[in-house]
Amino acid sequence: MKRAFVFPGQGSQAVGMGKALADTFPQAKAVFDEVDEALSQKLSAIMWEGPAEELTLTANTQPALMAVSVAAIRVLEAEAGLDLKNHAAFVAGHSLGEYSALAAAGSLSVADTARLLRIRGNAMQNAVPVGQGAMAALLGLEFDAALEVAREAAQGEVCDAANDNGGAQVVVSGHKAAVERAVAIAQTKGAKRAVMLAVSAPFHCALMQPAADAMREALGRVTVNAPVVLVVANVEAAAITDPAAIRDALVRQVTGTVRWRESVAYMAAQGVESFYEVGSGKVLTGLVKRIAAGASATAIGTPEDVAAFKASLNA
């Protein structure tokens, strides 16, 4: 049976995430300590105590979610005997989750990943002045139809498909007026719902080019190793292992579409039957079930989840 381990992105954060893992397993506590040290900040205190407004700042959310995901992987390795090289066919992550996947697979160190995500969060936040950009979810339209809506809405401004999440759920991103036009147009094209999202910046669109440039520079300063398991890149919806290709994919990901539907479909087509979402929340678990009919999807983020996985792996 082929397995894939997938890692959540922004929106999956919650105050308290990862605390039970840290309280129960020294391997998890060590990851949170390493991230705190790398950032010269007690990020773990914000994660476990809040306030929520501080946790949801992009520059905090990104390394925080990665920390929970990698802590959970380290616990699975220690407690359940997980070995990604032998037990997984692929790893993948949604947006910032791709960094979590790379850290889990040994391509990036945890400290470097934390620092990269802090840079990424700040750069994405600062790429567009507050109020000039927006994002919206178009529900009930398949990707090609949503792409057509975005093109029609642009009218000389930026309106790009940011996330193809599957299950006829597509997010568009760009100039605020263009995104508002997309919401109105989508409702005339058969969308079940089209709603503006409460986000702090228009992620994954051409307006993020300054952030992509910042990440190209930052990624050039860190060591990128070949991962121990195939990594499915957001912008390729296919597996990559070459360190230069990984760097390039992470840069292009900042302005490119998160091709999650195609990524999951690709892994399923390669024979993956069991998907495990590692970290905070269950967003990807729900998306996987909608995309890969017949595949199982399980979230692992608590000590109880770890115990259940251990039992299944050793069954």
Image: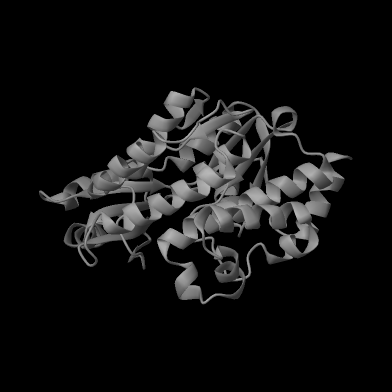
Q: Nearer the viewer, residue 246 or 89?
A: 246
- Left/right placement of residue 101 relative to residue 133 reads right
Count of numbered labels shown in the rendering: 0
Q: In the rendering, at what x and y percent does residue 214 appear?
A: 31, 44
Q: Which residue is drawn at 55% across and 75% down?
A: 50
- Left/right placement of residue 284 relative to residue 72 reads left
Q: In the rendering, at what x and y percent does residue 238 appear?
A: 49, 28
Residue 46 can be seen, yes or no: yes
Q: Which residue is drawn at 55% across and 46% down?
A: 111
Quadrant of the snapshot with the C terminus: top right
Q: Which of 77 and 235 is in front in this view?
A: 77
Q: In the rendering, at what x and y percent does residue 291 appear?
A: 54, 43
> Which quadrant of the view contains residue 254?
top left
Residue 299 can be seen, yes or no: no
- Left/right placement of residue 165 relative to residue 205 reads right
Q: Which residue is drawn at 48% across and 60% down?
A: 61
State whether residue 178 is above or below residue 290.
Answer: below
Q: Nearer the viewer, residue 38 or 113?
A: 38
State whether residue 215 is above or below residue 38.
Answer: above
Q: In the rendering, at what x and y percent does residue 94 appear?
A: 49, 46
Q: Which residue is drawn at 39% across and 55% down?
A: 121
> Which quadrant of the view contains residue 135?
bottom left
